[in-house]
Image (cartoon, grey):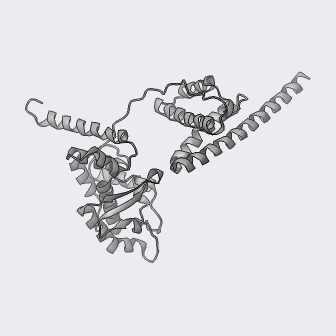
């Protein structure tokens, strides 16, 4: 009899947990819809919110609680479990930020419950400086592709455009012919939050683009048709992962002895502009940053570079 009762209790608990999880998922969907409509957040940001909130919802459901009834101790317990499993402070901070946005939305929109994150401090994390390249290293990277080959010409053009404009890699691979005005020498980008910006291409990247569109692009496509500016042999849009492999290959060919992320030329673009006296707010507009504080990290990079140059070349450095 006791065994039967235990089994029944186990089934009831599992069913209750499933109901809690389903209710939590519905609440998360409503929050994400509101976040998208109000703030125009990117798909990647919304996916990150969903992942974080579902992780907490599952953790709570296993303990017989829906997300809507989470308390401060639940949030701290979840984060503690994650830290014990090896989560880093940056990951915990991102999750706490997701939770905070959800519970504040719930308070604002539904006037229900409390914000269990209100008295939880963010984990202290150092802000890492983005890796950058020297101007000589950029030159070596740009010269690495074999431009006698159509694909090599495409790769060189992509690298030139990336360094000339500071585009995000996602923005680069999603570029279409209609986004580029060769007569005016500008590229039109709709970035995060639907913000539009016009970025000058500069003479060098403009010349590479004109050559690419006039010849090698057609050689790559043959009879296929696409609006994407930098197609693959299949006539598809290039993926971010494919571009990462391109960067990796040319990094090795250029003799650069460290791993570089696909964002490296964006970082170099910002750092080198500041090194040559560009105004921080101009760099902010070109990068598409909504907040100047995001751009200010590059002043630290530039400052580090100046220190290195001083130490290397000053007689008393």
Q: In this view, does 80 lie above or below 183?
A: above
Residue lying at the far right in this picture: please name it. Answer: 1
Residue at image position (88%, 25%) is 5
Which quarter of the rendering shows the C terminus?
Answer: top left
Query: Which of the 4 image quarters holds residue 25?
Result: top right
Residue 91 in the image, given as x and y percentages of width and height = 49, 34
Residue 30 in the image, given as x and y percentages of width and height = 64, 45
In the picture provided, is 28 more to the left or to the right than 155?
right
Residue lying at the far bottom in this picture: please name it. Answer: 223
Q: Is residue 47 above or below residue 177?
A: above
In the picture provided, is 288 more to the left or to the right than 271?
right
Frontmost residue, 103 versus 145: 103
In the picture provided, is 87 more to the left or to the right than 289?
right
**Can residue 189 be seen here?**
yes
Q: How many marks?
A: 0
Residue 96 in the image, given as x and y percentages of width and height = 53, 32
Frontmost residue, 13 versus 105: 105
In the picture provided, is 88 more to the left or to the right than 135?
right
Residue lying at the far left in this picture: please name it. Answer: 315
Query: Which of the 4 image quarters holds residue 132?
Result: top left
Residue 252 in the image, given as x and y percentages of width and height = 31, 50
Q: Is residue 202 above or below residue 10?
A: below
**Can residue 215 be seen here?**
no
Which quarter of the rendering shows the N terminus?
Answer: top right
């Amino acid at each position: 009899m006791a065994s039967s009762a235990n089994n029944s209790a186990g089934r009831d608990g599992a069913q209750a947990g499933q109901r809690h999880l389903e209710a939590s998922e519905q609440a998360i969907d409503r929050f994400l819809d509101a976040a998208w409509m109000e703030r125009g957040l990117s798909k990647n940001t919304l996916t990150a919110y969903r992942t974080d909130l579902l992780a907490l919802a599952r953790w709570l459901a296993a303990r017989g609680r829906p997300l809507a009834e989470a308390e401060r101790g639940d949030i701290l317990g979840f984060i503690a479990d994650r830290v014990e499993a090896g989560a880093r402070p940056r990951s915990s901070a991102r999750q706490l930020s997701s939770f905070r946005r959800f519970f504040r939305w719930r308070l604002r929109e539904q006037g229900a419950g409390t914000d269990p994150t209100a008295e939880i401090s963010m984990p202290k994390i150092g802000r890492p400086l983005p890796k950058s390249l020297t101007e000589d290293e950029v030159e070596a990277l740009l010269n690495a592709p074999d431009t006698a080959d159509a694909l090599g010409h495409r790769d060189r053009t992509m690298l030139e455009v990336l360094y000339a404009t500071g585009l995000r890699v996602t923005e680069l691979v999603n570029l279409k012919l209609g986004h580029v005005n060769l007569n005016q020498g500008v590229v039109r980008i709709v970035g995060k939050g639907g913000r539009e910006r016009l970025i000058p291409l500069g003479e060098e990247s403009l010349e590479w683009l004109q050559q690419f569109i006039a010849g090698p692009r057609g050689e790559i496509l043959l009879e296929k048709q696409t609006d994407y500016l930098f197609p693959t042999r299949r006539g598809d849009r290039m993926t971010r992962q494919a571009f990462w492999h391109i960067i990796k290959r040319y990094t090795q060919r250029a003799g650069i002895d460290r791993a570089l992320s696909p964002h490296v030329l964006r970082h170099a673009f910002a750092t080198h502009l500041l090194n040559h006296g560009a105004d921080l707010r101009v760099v902010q507009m070109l990068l598409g940053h909504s907040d100047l504080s995001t751009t200010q990290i590059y002043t630290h990079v530039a400052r580090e570079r100046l220190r290195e140059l001083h130490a290397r070349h000053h007689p008393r450095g």
